[in-house]
Image: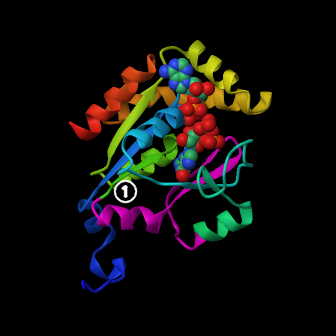
Amino acid sequence: MMPVLPIQSIATTEERLHLGRLIVLTGPSGVGKGTLMRSLLKRHPELYYSVSVTTRSPRPGEIDGKDYYFISRSKFEQLLAEGEFLEWAEFAGNYYGTPREPVLNQIHFGKLVVLEIELEGARQIRASFPSALSIFILPPSFDELEKRIRSRAQDSEEAIARRLLRAQEEIKAANEFDIQIVNDDFETALNDIETVLFK
Ligand SMILES: Nc1nc2c(ncn2[C@@H]2O[C@H](COP(=O)(O)OP(=O)(O)O)[C@@H](O)[C@H]2O)c(=O)[nH]1
Ligand SMILES: Nc1ncnc2c1ncn2[C@@H]1O[C@H](COP(=O)(O)OP(=O)(O)O)[C@@H](O)[C@H]1O
């Protein structure tokens, strides 16, 4: 049997990353990142989706440990101080972060790891891991983006307004990322992502 070594003793963070691949999916809130991600995972169960930590309250139907790890602000700040996040950001009044170790371990074992994160976090990943592949999802129009956020009907009017304001800024950053995909027709966008990842 192969001896099981702690990952930390095998390689540095950057060396570990070169053994697998890190994919970043970003774009404004409501553009369809989560829906695309769920379909992608159904079609490709071999992908590893990194479950984020957040201080936002769970929405109806969301499951702790599956959609997010829901934690308090003070716990988040403690984890942050302990260096437990690969990246993190404050978005619409809440903290979000990617747990470091599970992601690095999966990459080390050769998995394709996918992060679905907002702009600031995506920028941090680009800066710390230049070998990561980043995909920016664009809406067909701003009006359509607003419709999608409203149709979800799970956020307060204030939260919707904050997301829309932020979305305008985020869309301007699309060109910073390796690939831009417009999520107009859902199947087409999903196929485009698959082409980037697997072909
Ligand atoms: N930086 C960062 N952003 C995250 C993380 N997890 C989720 N997000 C982003 O935070 C934003 C808000 O997420 P959420 O509250 O679930 O709302 P929704 O994506 O609009 O449904 C989205 O743009 C997510 O992609 C994370 O770990 N780090
Ligand atoms: N291509 C599409 N056409 C129409 N509606 C879409 C499309 N993609 C996603 N949606 C819808 O838009 C809303 C926001 O999608 P969601 O995945 O929650 O976005 P995000 O994770 O980027 O915030 C959902 O109601 C979803 O069903």
How far across and how far down the image is residue 194, in percent? 31, 34
Which residue carries the number 1 mark?
128
Question: Taking 164 as reference, is 27 left or right?
Answer: left
Ligand 1 neighbours mark 1 (CB distance < 8 Å): no
Image point (37%, 63%), residue name: 106
Give the crowd class for mark 1: few <14, some 14-19, many >=20 residues within 10 Å: few
The residue closer to the viewer here, 78 or 181, is: 181
How far across and how far down the image is residue 68, in percent? 61, 53
Question: Taking 134 as reference, is 198 left or right?
Answer: left
Image point (30%, 66%), residue name: 108
Q: Could you tell me which secondary element the residue under label 1 belongs to? A: helix
Task: Classify 116 as above or below 196.
Answer: below
Question: Taking 164 as reference, is 2 left or right?
Answer: left
Q: Look at the image and tell me whether residue 24 can be seen.
A: yes
Question: Residue pushed farthest left?
Answer: 199
Image point (32%, 32%), residue name: 179
Image point (47%, 39%), residue name: 37
Quadrant where the N terminus sits is bottom left
